[in-house]
Amino acid sequence: METSHLVRERGFLFVFEEIMMTDIVDKLKTPEECERLIENVQLRNPEMALRARRRAIELRATKHNAKSNAEKEALQA
């Protein structure tokens, strides 16, 4: 009985961490901020580091004024 409670609790915490991680990464405004976050979290939270890398790529693509989806995808590749 206690084990199922812990699993449910961990599941809740996992969802909460996922929301926090997304919020933090979404608030990054420059590729440099992304790089700083990557350096700080890559050992503790590789998934967050990966999301920050993707965010940095998106921000760089935006900085290059890509107008079409094809241009954005090419810059992200």
Image (spheres, helix red, strand yellow):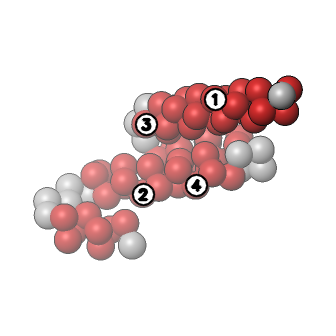
Residue drawn at the location 36% of the way across and 49% of the way down: 59
Question: Is 34 situated left or right of 10 in this image?
Answer: left
Which class describes the residues within 10 Å of circle 3: few (<14), some (14-19), or many (20+)?
A: few
Instruction: Work out how far the residue at label 3 is from the one at label 4, CA to CA, in angstroms.
Output: 13 Å
Mark 2 lies on residue:
57
In the rendered structure, find residue 53 and report the number of the disc placed on it: none
| Labels 2, 4: front one | 4
In terms of secondary structure, where does tag 2 sit? helix
| Labels 3, 1: front one | 1
- State the quadrant of the C terminus: bottom left
Residue drawn at the location 21% of the way across and 69% of the way down: 71
In terms of secondary structure, where does tag 3 sit? helix
Q: Based on the displayed image, in which of its 4 quarters is residue 12 positioned?
A: top right
The kind of residue tagged 1 is Phe
The kind of residue tagged 3 is Asp
**Mark with earlier residue (2, 4):** 4
Mark 1 lies on residue:
12
In terms of secondary structure, where does tag 4 sit? helix
Residue 32 seen from this side: yes
**Mark with earlier residue (3, 4):** 3
Instruction: Work out how far the residue at label 2 is from the one at label 3, CA to CA, in angstroms.
Output: 13 Å
Instruction: Work out how far the residue at label 2 is from the one at label 4, CA to CA, in angstroms.
Output: 11 Å
**In front here: 13 or 5?**
5
